[in-house]
Each structure stands twice: as structure tokens, then as C-alpha cells.
């Protein structure tokens, strides 16, 4: 199940063999993986750039690594950012966008049906069956 959160702190991975991805933490202390490219979309490239941001997060299953860094066939779940946003308003807009589109589509259908002269009963049936 996906949920929304604010990521308050964290750091980029550094060192040999690291890809520069980000490990963030929210107010509940949950550890959240964020891809480097997602952080770059927010303008964050190094730890000192990072300020609180917002994310839709979900669990993903990933392969574990052995002590040498090689992938194994053992799987584990990781909490990770599915999308990131600079403001809560941008996150809310994105999360609600599908529902807003559906409402706008129904409103447009109602307008077209009324213009075409459909009765209130026919219009209700049409709106019930749409989308």
C-alpha cells in the first residue's frame, strides 16, 4: 500500500562501489530509499543540499547482496520513494490527479448530455455507467 510522507533527513551513499542513492528518514523514523535521479530532480546532489521534501512511498522487493556486494537470490522488502515532490501541495495535486480527472470527465459528460437534450433520468443512468 502506497502512502505519502515527508522526508526530513538522510544522506547520500558514498564510497567505492556506491551509486550515490539517498537514504532518508521521516518523522516516524522509517528508513526510505530514494534513487539518486529522483533526488537530482529536486536539485539535491550532496548532503548539504538536502532540505525536507515529500514523497509517495511503497514497499518493493529487492535482491539482497552478500558481503562482497554481489547479488544473491534472497529477496527482502525495502521502503522506497516512488515519486518525490518539493512541496506538500505538489504531492497532494499529484495524488489527487486521477480523481480530479474523473470528476472533470463526468462534468464534461453531463454538459454534453444536457446539451444533447437527455432527460434527467437518462443523464443519471449515463453518469452512473461512465468511467
Image (cartoon, rainbow, N blue to C red):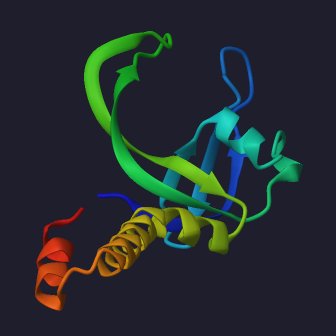
Q: Residue furthest bottom?
A: 120
Q: Residue furthest front?
A: 117
Q: Residue at x 48, y 64 (%)?
A: 97
Q: Quadrant of the N terminus?
A: bottom left
Instruction: Please give left or right for residue 104 compared with residue 19 in the image.
Output: left
Whole-percent x, y for residue 57 in the image? 45, 55
Q: Is residue 29 visible?
A: no
Taking depth in this image into account, of 24 and 68 the one nearest to the observer is 24
Q: Quadrant of the C terminus?
A: bottom left
Whole-percent x, y for residue 68 in the image? 49, 10
Whole-percent x, y for residue 130 in the image? 21, 65
Whole-percent x, y for residue 129 in the image? 13, 67
Q: Residue at x 36, y 67 (%)?
A: 102
Q: Residue at x 21, y 75 (%)?
A: 127
Instruction: Please give left or right for residue 105 compared with residue 76 in the image.
Output: right
Quarter where residue 72 is shown: top left
Instruction: Please give left or right for residue 53 compared with residue 69 in the image.
Output: right
Q: Is residue 63 above or below residue 29?
A: above
Q: Is residue 5 visible?
A: yes
Quarter where residue 77 is shown: top left
Q: Residue at x 35, y 47 (%)?
A: 59
Q: Is residue 113 above or below residue 42?
A: below
Taking depth in this image into account, of 59 and 126 the one nearest to the observer is 126
Amino acid at each position: 500500500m502506497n502512502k505519502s510522507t515527508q522526508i526530513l533527513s538522510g544522506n547520500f551513499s558514498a564510497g567505492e562501489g556506491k551509486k550515490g542513492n539517498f537514504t532518508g528518514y521521516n518523522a516516524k523514523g522509517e528508513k526510505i530509499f530514494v534513487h539518486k535521479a529522483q533526488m537530482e530532480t529536486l536539485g539535491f546532489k550532496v548532503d548539504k543540499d538536502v532540505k525536507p521534501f515529500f514523497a509517495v512511498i511503497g514497499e518493493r522487493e529487492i535482491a539482497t547482496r552478500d558481503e562482497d556486494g554481489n547479488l544473491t537470490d534472497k529477496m527482502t522488502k525495502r521502503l522506497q520513494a516512488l515519486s518525490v515532490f518539493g512541496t506538500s501541495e505538489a504531492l497532494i495535486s499529484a495524488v489527487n490527479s486521477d480523481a480530479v480527472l474523473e470528476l472533470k470527465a463526468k462534468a464534461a459528460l453531463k454538459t454534453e448530455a444536457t446539451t444533447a437534450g437527455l432527460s434527467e433520468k437518462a443523464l443519471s443512468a449515463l453518469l452512473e455507467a461512465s468511467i
